[in-house]
Image (cartoon, rainbow, N blue to C red):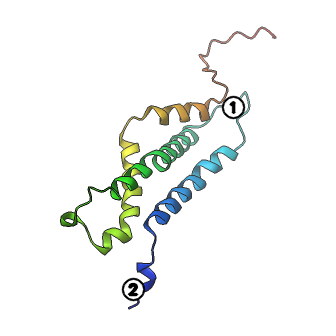
């Protein structure tokens, strides 16, 4: 069994690639989606997709780099080190942890991104708007 290909894995590159893949997949497609017209409201499914994309953005841009830095910190102990397996799959574990941390927490930045995507003009319809041009 050849271990040379596996041993050449770059941990930092794997984390960065995973972050880019998660960002490019969902968030970019949502940004390029045409805005709804005045008469149409977004469906609940579309809003759920936007919230999930905002969570993935925060996870990849904020939480994942912190977890990678913790993994590389000088406080790393050989006593608790997972060996080759931790080195090879640590980035994937960090990605999963970051996603779950953001999903289970109430980060205000996720809500701010969600609101900006759902309502880009900042207008919060109350249902009682006055149409002065009618």
Q: Quadrant of residue 42?
A: top right
Left or right: 69 with respect to 128?
Answer: left
Q: Secondary structure at mark 2?
A: loop
Q: Which mark is residue 75?
A: none
Dot 1 or dot 2: first in sequence order is 2
* Neighbours of disc 1 within 10 Å: few (<14), some (14-19), many (20+): few
- Please tell me which residue lies in front, 46 or 120: 120
Other-residue count near label 2 (Cα within 10 Å), few / some / many at <14 / 14–19 / ≥20: few
Query: In terms of depth relative to the viewer, which is nearer, 52 or 112?
Result: 112
Against 117, residue 133 (above or below) is above
Location of residue 40 (image quadrant): top right
Compared across the picture, whether 69 is left or right of 80 comes to: right
Q: Position of residue 114 (x, y in %)?
A: 54, 35
Q: CA distance from mark 1 to mark 2?
A: 56 Å
Residue 40 circle label = 1
Q: Look at the image and tell me in which quarter the C terminus lies.
A: top right
Looking at the image, the residue that sits furthest to the left is: 79
Q: Please give the residue where the numbered disc 2 appears in the rendered image.
A: 3
Asked whether, in this view, residue 82 is left or right of residue 3, the answer is: left
Q: Residue at x 40, y 56 (%)?
A: 68
């Amino acid at each position: 069994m050849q271990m040379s290909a596996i041993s050449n894995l770059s941990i930092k590159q794997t984390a960065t690639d995973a972050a880019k893949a998660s960002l490019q997949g969902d968030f970019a497609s949502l940004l390029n989606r045409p805005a709804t017209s005045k008469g149409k409201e977004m469906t609940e499914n579309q809003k759920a997709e936007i919230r999930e994309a905002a969570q993935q953005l925060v996870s990849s841009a904020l939480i994942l780099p912190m977890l990678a830095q913790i993994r590389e910190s000088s406080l790393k102990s050989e006593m608790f080190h997972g060996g080759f397996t931790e080195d090879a799959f640590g980035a994937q574990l960090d990605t999963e942890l970051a996603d779950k941390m953001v999903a289970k927490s109430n980060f205000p930045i996720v809500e701010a991104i969600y609101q900006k995507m759902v309502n880009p003009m900042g207008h919060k319809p109350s249902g009682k708007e006055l149409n002065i041009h009618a």
